[in-house]
Amino acid sequence: MPNQLQPTLGQEQQRWVAGHAHVAGIDEAGRGALAGPVVAAALITPPGAQLAGVWAQVRDSKLLSPTRRAALTPRIQAAALTWAVGVAPAQVIDAVGIAAATRQAMCAAINALTPQPDWLLIDWVKLPEVAIPQTSYVRADQTIVSVAAASILAKTHRDDLMRALHAQYPHYGFAGHKGYAAASHREALARFGPCPEHRHTFAPIAQPRLLTALFHMAGGSRRRLGDRGEQLAVDALVQAGLAIIARNWRCPSGEIDIVAQEPAADYAAGGAVVPWLVLVEVRTRRGNAFGSARQSITPRKQAKLREVAGHYLQSTGWAGPWRIDVVAVQMDADGRLLEVEHIRHAVTG
């Protein structure tokens, strides 16, 4: 029995002897995550390759550190006859299910190979959609070099994608846990709810009551609900092109939740374009027992916002155009997000 820590080229060699020159190994990464895509990689080892050089260093990606995977990836890519990756995003996973999405990603990787393989060695999955002879094996990433190499390429590519998502949604910590159900990820879900890159058909995301329970287990309170609403507001403002320059600015009269600038402003002073200063009040409501988030901006609240805005302008010396916006975050009784509405010039006078 092969050493599970040392994959061999035994399966590839059997296919080469049988006349199959282009034998591809296929594996995936991210199947069990709560967020992000599932990524598959396929690669063909050169016919007649020996268990030496980079092929002797290949292991199942789960047994390697991130640093080691990153170091091996370009060497594997250079040594392979050909390689490719396929990606099925979270939206596809929700639409067709994780099994079908995994097969889609694998098929995309296989179809991108040049030359095309004449035999497939696959970790666990069977691909009836592909008219290529194939064999699937349990734990193939631990015993077959080409599959283990594919697991490394899939894992490093997916990790790169999750780091990019972290830059877009930093409060979830995707760069650390890569979308898996780590304790920090579960707590972030409890506090902020799912984002568009989460798999909304996966538990607990698909079960609002369970997500609400997690919210309370994580210390959920009115303040935590407000924190979640503020982060959703930040996401909406950034996506609308505003730059966030401060959060939770306080003075004796009150607080400004978010201070932002809108760079594409139609205001000029002395020939120079000056951005709008945007002071944002975030109103978060769960259920409609006390009215909607938008309805909570009463005349009294508007007067308070104008007072706090005056303190901010005086303390910073801002002389350009400014306004007060409201971001209304509305959730249902179970804490599931219904709407994020950005109301420009919400407070006048």
Image (cartoon, grey):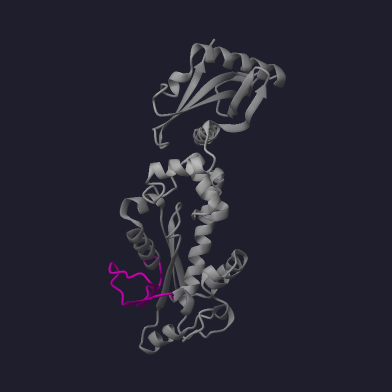
Judge whether residue 275 can be spotted in this image: no
Return the x and y of residue 50 as percentages of the image width and height: 52, 86
**Nearest the eye: 104 or 340:** 340
The image shows residue 73, relative to residue 331, as above or below, that is below
**Nearest the eye: 230 or 134:** 230
Residue 138, picture quadrant: bottom left
Based on the picture, tell me whether residue 11 belongs to the magenta stretch.
no
Return the x and y of residue 219 as percentages of the image width and height: 54, 40
Task: Give the residue displayed 37% in from the left and 46% down from the top.
Answer: 206
Based on the picture, tell me whether residue 114 belongs to the magenta stretch.
yes
The magenta segment is 111-139
Return the x and y of residue 81 as percentages of the image width and height: 47, 75
Outermost residue to the top: 349
Dominant secondary structure of the residues highlighted in magenta in the image: loop
The image shows residue 86, relative to residue 329, as above or below, that is below
Return the x and y of residue 255 as percentages of the image width and height: 62, 23
**Nearest the eye: 253 or 119:** 253
Task: Give the residue displayed 47% in from the left and 19% down from the top.
Answer: 296
Number of marks in the rendered image = 0
**Nearest the eye: 52 or 111:** 52
The image shows residue 143, relative to residue 297, as above or below, that is below
Judge whether residue 177 can be spotted in this image: yes
Quadrant where the C terminus lies? Answer: top right
| 337 with respect to 153 (left or right) | left
Task: Give the residue displayed 56% in from the left and 43% down from the top.
Answer: 171
Residue 265, picture quadrant: top right
